[in-house]
Amino acid sequence: MYNESILMKRGENMTEIARFYDDFQPSHYDIYLDIDRGTKKIKGTTRITGIAKSANIAIHQKNLKIDLVEVNGEQSKFEIDTTKDALRLTMDKLGKVEVKVEYETKLTDSMMGIYPSYYEIDGVKKQIIGTQFETNFARQAFPCVDEPEAKATFDLALKYDEKPGELTLANMPENRVEDGVHYFDTTVRMSTYLVAFAFGELQGKYAETKSGVKIGVFATKAHKANELDFGLSIAKRSIEFYEDFYETPYPLPHSWQLALPDFSAGAMENWGLVTYREAYLTLDPDNTSLEMKQLVATVIAHELAHQWFGDLVTMKWWDDLWLNESFANMMEYVAIDALEPEWRIWETFQASESPAALQRDATDGVQSVHVQVKNPAEIDALFDGAIVYAKGARMLVMVRALIGDDALRAGLKNYFEEHQYDNATGADLWKALGKASGMDVLKIINSWLEQPGYPVVTAKVEDDDLILSQKQFFIGEGHDQGRQWQIPLNSNYDEIPTIMSEKEVKIAGYQNLREKKGEPLRINIGNSSHFIVKYDDTLLEDILRDVTGYDSITQLQILQDLRLLAEGNQVSYETIVPLLNKFADSKYALVNTALYSVARNLRKFVTPHTVEEQNLKALYNKLSAHQVDRLGWIQRVNESVDDQLTRPYVVGAAIYGNNKTAVAQAHELFSANKNQLSSLQADVRAAILINEVKNFGSHELFNKLLEEHRRSADGSYKSDICAALTSSKDPAILNELIDKFEDADTIKPQDLRAWFAGVLSNAEGEQLAWDWIRNEWQWLEDTVGGDMEFTTFITVIARVLRTEERLAEFKEFFEPKLVVPGLTREIKMDTSVIESRVKLIAEQQNGVNKAIKEVL
Ligand code: BES
Ligand code: ZN
């Protein structure tokens, strides 16, 4: 899944990364931790057995207060170098050595390292302890060579201020408890960033795979027991699927899934103990939208894909992080498509990953999928989700389409066999896939992997020649460097080359081809390659003549490519507006997704509280009216997947469009369920709550919803409340809401960005939210500054601002921060994003508004 939570991460310093593995190669760790939740103090002893290759070795540590170091049983002098997170030692002799470190540290409150997650049951505050070590936070828990290549085995022993009934979980099963110390079985050879443990008042549910792997799902007792069932079933079946698909057994005795109330990312593939945001693991099986179920399923399948690709075979260094993430991002769809074929989950891929990648990758200055990493800030800046996840997955989908599943599986099997319990690079994967398929995969893939951006292929007919040409596609100013790609064209016309490497190809006798084929020319069928197509007027007319006759992906693609071309100012939105009505009654969820994505993009052209805004609302109303009538608010039994996925879009559109009947119906549903709002049907709950807050809002309602939010452990319900409250039209309420932004008991730091984004994109709240973030930047930095979410606050701002004045304010505020490593690229790109939007609005606004009026 392309998830908003991973876009980018921020760095601290620009020094070259010190790599310690060359000088010291650990083979085994004995880790003992004694954790006191009351004082937050941790006492630790770590024994590392390894090979010293140099007289001067270094071991990573961060924020550890080191009391004693022994080398081979003798107390040793040591030095701490905080700039490199290093504990430096001098060896008397090279070769095998045992280093023992005694230290003290504290629970962090940053969702990194060993940290508490806070939650409430019946007003009583509680916490569970968990860990997050990727990318480099293991060093905050125990001294180690904290590099993915430094694989070793681990013996973990845990003691804590335990109370009866608490559960203790780790990568491996518990071996024994002695004097209150939990000892776990020795792990297999693995990287430090995958070590994990957790403890607290947890509930669990268990299952077993056909091959005998124990599966478990765990969460706090704030959840109803049946909220664990869906995840358990998906996890079990995913492990079974991968064992079969990879033809490689799952190598550990168990696969635990644990939901943590505080979680910075979306989920984390710790080997044998995968951790999740609660919203991405637990769900109410009786009242959760299909969209959310699909999301949870793909997240689980993603992390479990990593148990092989990432955990068993790990990237050698962080520059190949894309290898882990792009691959897992593709496999989550491969797996779920096999587990739940009726969902047609590849359509969801087209609805979420494709637009995310195509949008972000069109901004000049974007990173390539593979990025060289030399200093810490660069590791941190690797996590551009739209690129590393979405584009990377699209790239691998392209590879899969080229070589086929049989070669993919055969290649993977070899890759796992050759590199298991070890590391690999991108080149190793291409080699394995190349060997299995007999194709030079790297040659084709290199242009996509190493170059930023993607091409627009222009198709035009001149003097009966069909001419195809490629050129980098930009939204906003772009510096054309003449980049070229090896493009799998996937046309329905056999005469079109399979791969286009040239800048331009010419095919004679278009009319003949057209007649012979009997259908319009199409390129990039299935939208499986990462490029867009610009057809000339004749070719486009040919396609549009019977556009609703195509399959759903094709219809989405046509709308999506046109939308992108409009964003890139290569066609006008004015010409797209008249097409929208054609798609309005589509029975395909995917087409509705694409339709409302175009519609949403029209909002930037209308100024709030004007006739133009009224017209756009009328258009939304017109587009959605039939569908709202057809689908209604209440789910029928045995409803099709498409209908289930379409309903939230159309009722949302009707509420935005002030459809009188819909507004009244939603209000009625609200009133009828006043005392049990969470049991409002989940797929329309957001629309009902938004309607209520917007059109019937009061202080009383505000307080009620906020209280519901505080009390609920249902992630979907909480995010519906967030959507509703942030859409209030009442400045007093919005102000009160913003006052809660810094109150972690009400809005957890992990959720803050969604609340901020909600208020910012609300016309009544824009100024308030924009002022808040500029005034509170220091607080934000102190609170989530080390977090992977941090730069995404800027991304969110750039999605909303749309005037000259705001652009100037954005620059005034962020330009001085360009020097902060890890922020540089994001600020530059976002400046360009806002600039291009301001320009687009200036150029197209009148035309668009005229076109909207004409289609009403
Ligand atoms: N390994 C990542 C999480 C991660 C990446 C943590 C980089 C720290 C640094 C995990 O597998 C992942 O991709 N999580 C996603 C959810 C996933 C389903 C797309 C996330 O956290 O958004
Ligand atoms: Zn991942």
Image (cartoon, rainbow, N blue to C red):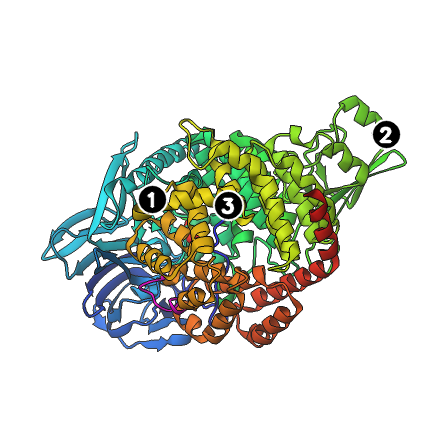
Location of residue 19 (image quadrant): bottom left
In-front residue for pair 590/853:
853
In-front residue for pair 331/261:
261
Q: Which residue is mark 2?
A: 509
Query: Going by the image, does 832 lie left or right of 89?
Result: right
Q: Residue at x 53, y 57 (%)?
A: 384
Q: Position of residue 546 (x, y in %)?
A: 71, 29
Give the distance between the C-alpha atoms of the residues marked 1 and 2, in whole angstroms.
65 Å
Looking at the rendering, the stretch of residues picked out in magenta corresponds to: 739-747
- SS under mark 3: helix
Q: Residues within 10 Å of mark 2 (few under 14, many from 20)?
A: few
Residue 652 badge = 3
Q: Residue at x 34, y 70 (%)?
A: 62
Q: Give the mark, 3 or 1, whose residue is nearer the N terminus.
A: 3
- SS under mark 1: loop
Give the distance between the C-alpha atoms of the residues marked 2 and 3, in whole angstroms.
48 Å
Q: Position of residue 38 (x, y in %)?
A: 18, 67
- Kindly identify the amino acid type of the residue bearing the numbered disc 3: Gly
Picture mark count: 3
From the image, give the main secondary structure of the stretch colored magenta: loop
Q: Give the mark, 1 or 2, whose residue is nearer the N terminus.
A: 2
Q: Residue at x 44, y 60 (%)?
A: 755
Residue 673 badge = 1
- Kindly identify the amino acid type of the residue bearing the numbered disc 1: Asn
* In this rendering, the label closer to the viewer, 2 or 3: 3
Residue 332 badge = none
Q: Give the mark, 2 or 3, whose residue is nearer the N terminus.
A: 2
Residue 323 in view: yes
Considering the image in quadrants, where does the C terminus appear? top right
- Kindly identify the amino acid type of the residue bearing the numbered disc 2: Gly
Question: Is 756 colored magenta in this rendering?
Answer: no
